[in-house]
Image (tube, rainbow, N blue to C red):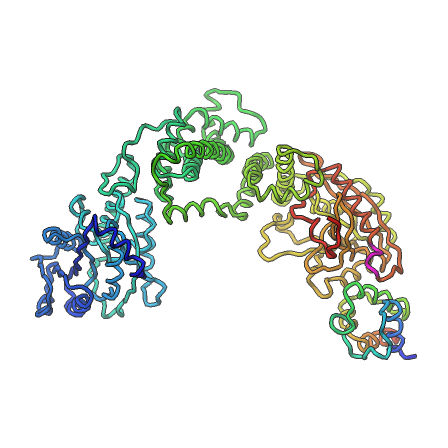
Amino acid sequence: MSVKEKLKQVLIEDLNLEDVDPEEIEDDTPLFGDGLGLDSLDAVELVVIVQKHFGVEIKDMEEGRPALQSINTLAAFIEDKRQE
Amino acid sequence: MLDYSQNLDLEIHLKDSFEVSIFIVIPVYNHVKSLRQVVEGVLRYHDRVLVVDDGSTDGGDDTLTGLPVELISHPQNRGKGAALLTAAEWGIACGLTHMICLDADGQHDPADLPCFIAAIEETPKALIVGQRDFDQESIPASSRFGRSFSNFWLRLQTGSGLKDSQSGFRAYPLFIFEQLNFWTRRYNFEIEVLVRSAWAGVELRDIAIAVHYPPADERVSHFRGFIDNLRLTILNTHLTLRSVVPWPHRKVVEGDSGEKGVKVLSPIHPLRSIRQLLKENSSPRQLAVAAAVGIILGTLPLVFCHTIAILFVCGFFRLNKVAAVSASQLCMPPLVPALCIEVGYFLRNGSWLTEFSLETLGYQAIQRLYEWFLGSLLVAPLLAIIVASITYLLATLIKRETKNVDMPLNDGPSERKIRQEWTSRSIGSSWQHQSFYLMIRLGGRRAAYALLYGVVLYYVLLPSVRRKCHYYLSRRFPEASGWESFWNSYRMILEFGKVLIDRALVGILGPEQVKEKQEGRQELLDLLAEKKGLILINAHVGCWQVAMSALSFVDTPVNLLMQREDGDIDRHYFEHAGIDCPYRIIDPRGYLGGILEMVEVLKRGEVLSVMGDRMLGEDRNGVDIPFLGGMVTMPFSAYKLASATGAPIAVLFSYKSGVGSYALKLYKTIRVPAGLSRDHNVFKPYVREFAESLELFCAEHPFQFFNFFDMWQNQLSDQTDK
């Protein structure tokens, strides 16, 4: 399973996004606001999820903020970190 | 501009008693270029025109050939004032009642004449001045300045709020020339006539006019800089001195003033005095303000100059001079100066001056004078508030008593405006803060506190302020009677003021001004040792700044979630001290409410401090929980953060525990487990734990929860049972 697919799956499970299928989430949908409709508290959860499932820690928000824009950016961030 | 139709009934009414007949006068001195044009323009609007040639040498009179105007010539130049007096004499001889004067240089537009005529018919006893619209760009800056300067003097001398005292476009009722004597004949005449008319009870009124300033090279002015300015200065000096002499001015118009039959006013007979003053067209409020001014100025150490200062200030603000001077008699030596000196001495030395000797009163006179000044800064406002309140109360009572007897209150627009200036927002917060900072610098904590007691009393007297205290206090003390709740409000605002002062003290005079005591210090260190970060939840209690500075024993960086408003005049202690903010500020208005930054600092094991008792800015993450017997909305983001990062929560409140001491107490440690569901309601028990701690704090320190809004009404979901 690709990083993107797994991301969609754990997002739906851990954030309890009811009535959403992994296929419905576009790769470039904004995570916050109009797109997926996540709020600031979900951001907290996201940081936790990424660490729990991918072993990647978002510590520095200088890099965390651009990463948390969409599935694409977040997946790219995770892959980058894993290679380091 | 006046509307004719509105004045029709007035006109008919007035014509019974006052037949108005008007002529236009154009004084001219060497304005050959513009004269004919001006006269022709005037003739289009009015057929009775007089030209007074004040000794012109350019043959301007010849240009008038064929025009139906009267002409009087002075053999030599005597001044504009002389020309106007000549015109007035002519008008009186002809049986006319009013003259409208406009300049020959073309700067006045004859098209404004109908407005003047309408204004004369509306107020035939007034002197009407055309007010130039100075927003135009062509007006020279020097003219603007000259106008403000001249308006200031006029106001000082007469209290008149005329907006353009320098304008030469005016309508004069001729009776003032029959009854008053004028000293001046040049340009200064135009000032003198205003001042003497005002003193004589003539209403000064302005109406808007257009003005045309010809380009500089076309302008012909005969105002000679030095000599005319000197004349103005001499006149102003004389008029100003005369204006403060309490000898009454002869009145030519009745009704507007009340200086007739003034009985002797005396502080020994306050009721009689107030009754007398009330008859003289002063409202209770005006009297109270006048009395307050009298007391404040009377208390200050203006040796030998009290009365003069009071007369000037009252003249300027058109306050009742007699009331103010009478009130200031209460401050006669030795009582009030002695009181001021004692207060000042106490502020500086912490004890009373008990030794009265040549040493303390003679050789140390300068010290005593300084203490007098210092003390008067406190005594003056306090005494003024007391005397003004008493005056107001008595005046209101008496007014009610004599309401049906006589005289409507003079409630002209100018008075009303001045009163608003005095009452509404003139005690601006910035001004007030500055005065407290000044007291701190001059006299330290005691001085600032002493000033506070009076200021708080003033505030508590305002119903709006009491209402703000009532939201919380009515829940904390549901049984309180009217007086108790008044007293509770006073204590609450007083505590709040003291905290503000202490905060400034720490900044201005140094951190040793405040002692701190910590309860739960070891627990805090233990929590930090877990290396999961630490969330401190504060509330708007005590002095959180002191709480934060008390955290200096913690060597971990501290981050504050704090929103600073633009124009926030409330200064923090480090700003007073001029040092950098020792904390990192996280702005809740940032991206995602600053929450990512909060996660970041906790992940680094740092301290994050947030307010737990109210929703901040755009934060919608609140839950409704019970607090002090009602439902309130409190934010839960901090608890979510704790759940996600594993950071413990410490509920930390500070309170003022003595005159110069604060305590910081760890009320509770809250742990929020990880893996809670997304439902907001799961945080309710933890938020409630915080609310319980706050309830406990309110029980222990009821007047230190600084909540001045109705937090019981601002719920997200409005589903409370009422």
Q: Quadrant of residue B11?
A: bottom left
Whether residue B307 is visible, yes or no, is no
Q: Residue furthest left?
A: B75
Spot occupied by residue A13 in the image (x, y as percentages of width and height): 89, 69
- On the picture, is B570 further left or further right than B291? right
Identity of the residue drawn at 81% across and 79% down: A27
Q: Is residue B268 above or below residue B556?
A: above
* Observer-nearest of B23 and B719: B719
B681 falls in the magenta region: yes
Residue B513 is at least partly visible in this image: yes
- The x and y percentages for residue A77 are 82, 74
Q: Nearer the viewer, residue B191 or B418?
A: B418
Residue for point 20% across, 62% down? B103
Of residues A11 and B43, the one drawn nearer to the viewer in this rendering: B43
Residue B586, horizontal then vertical, whole percent: 71, 59
Where, quadrant-wise, is the N terminus of chain B in this rendering? Answer: bottom left
Q: Can you give x and y, in whole percent of width and height, for residue B69 in the image?
A: 11, 64
Q: Is residue B171 left or right of residue B626?
A: left
> Is residue B121 placed above or below B627 in the rendered structure?
below
* B109 versus B503 height, above or below: below
Magenta region, residue range: B679-683
Q: Does the magenta stretch include residue B49?
A: no
Of residues B228 and B419, the one nearer the viewer is B419
